[in-house]
Image (cartoon, rainbow, N blue to C red):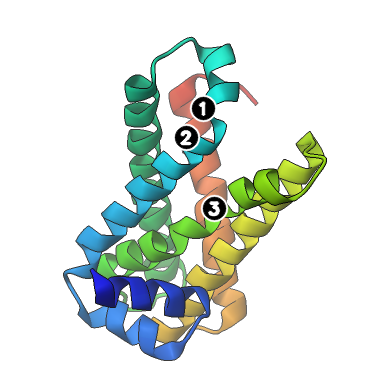
Amino acid sequence: MRDSMKMLLRTWRTERDAYSWLEFNDRATGDAIIFIAVTQLLTLIGTFRALRVFLDADFFTLALSFVVDALFFWLILSGLAFAVVKFLFQENLDFAFVLRLTGFAYPTRLLRIAAVAFLQPTTGSTVLIAGLLGTIWFGYIVAKGLDHAVEIGLARGALAVVGAYAGYLIISSILSGFAF
């Protein structure tokens, strides 16, 4: 796990050796799952008091819901990014690499908690901006990793990430019963 933590930080800094490590280290998929689960648990701990008012649920139920939701997001977003690169751009790409890449980029979403903790006064717009910055950072890491893996260029990597996010929003809306 110590190597994984080092590679997590290198992935966040978009270092090339981190992407190579993710590409060839099968064990990193399990580490990605752990990073996602821990990220969600930390997010829940940071927001539990506010969520409890609205959801009327105990910590264990919320924790399970948060982790399952994050794993669903991870699988769907990874699959859609893979599909865009594989079928739209006609590049040969390994799905396991995309899973590891998005899993290692996922903890950047913790930026929301940092905003709530350090930016005062905390307002809805502060949290929204921090969440947007975390999402952009996540997207940049994934786009850079896709560029590293199949040399598609950063713009096409970013397009794959945007396409994956759009697809996720559509799928999530359909499954939740939300109508556009």
Residue at the disc numbered 3: 109
| Neighbourhood count class around disc 3 (C-alpha, 10 Å): few under 14, some 14–19, many 20 upward | many
**As rendered, which of 174 and 42 lies closer to the eye?**
42
Q: Which three-letter amino acid code belongs to the residue tagged 2? A: Leu
Residue at the disc numbered 2: 44
Determine whether label 2 and label 1 are within 8 Å by CB. Answer: yes
Judge whether 180 appears above or below 43 on screen. Answer: above
| Neighbourhood count class around disc 1 (C-alpha, 10 Å): few under 14, some 14–19, many 20 upward | some
Residue at the disc numbered 1: 48
* Secondary structure state at the residue bearing disc 2: helix
Residue 38: where, in percent of width, then height? 36, 48
Choose the circle earlier in sequence order: 1 or 3. 1
Residue 84 in view here: yes
Judge whether 4 appears above or below 117 on screen. Answer: below
Give me the C-alpha separation between circle 1 and circle 3: 16 Å
Task: Choose top left, top right, bottom left or bottom right for residue 11.
Answer: bottom left
Please tell me which residue is depicted at 80% across the width and 44% down the height of the picture.
120
Choose the circle earlier in sequence order: 3 or 2. 2
Q: Which three-letter amino acid code belongs to the residue tagged 3? A: Arg
User: Which mark is nearer the camera, 3 or 2?
Assistant: 2
Please tell me which residue is depicted at 82% across the width and 40% down the height of the picture.
121
| Left or right, residue 127 beside residue 77 | right
Please tell me which residue is depicted at 37% across the width and 90% down the height of the picture.
17
Q: Dividing the image into 4 quarters, which one contains the N terminus?
A: bottom left
Q: Which three-letter amino acid code belongs to the residue tagged 1? A: Phe
Residue 162: where, in percent of width, then height? 59, 59
Judge whether 156 appears above or below 171 on screen. Answer: below
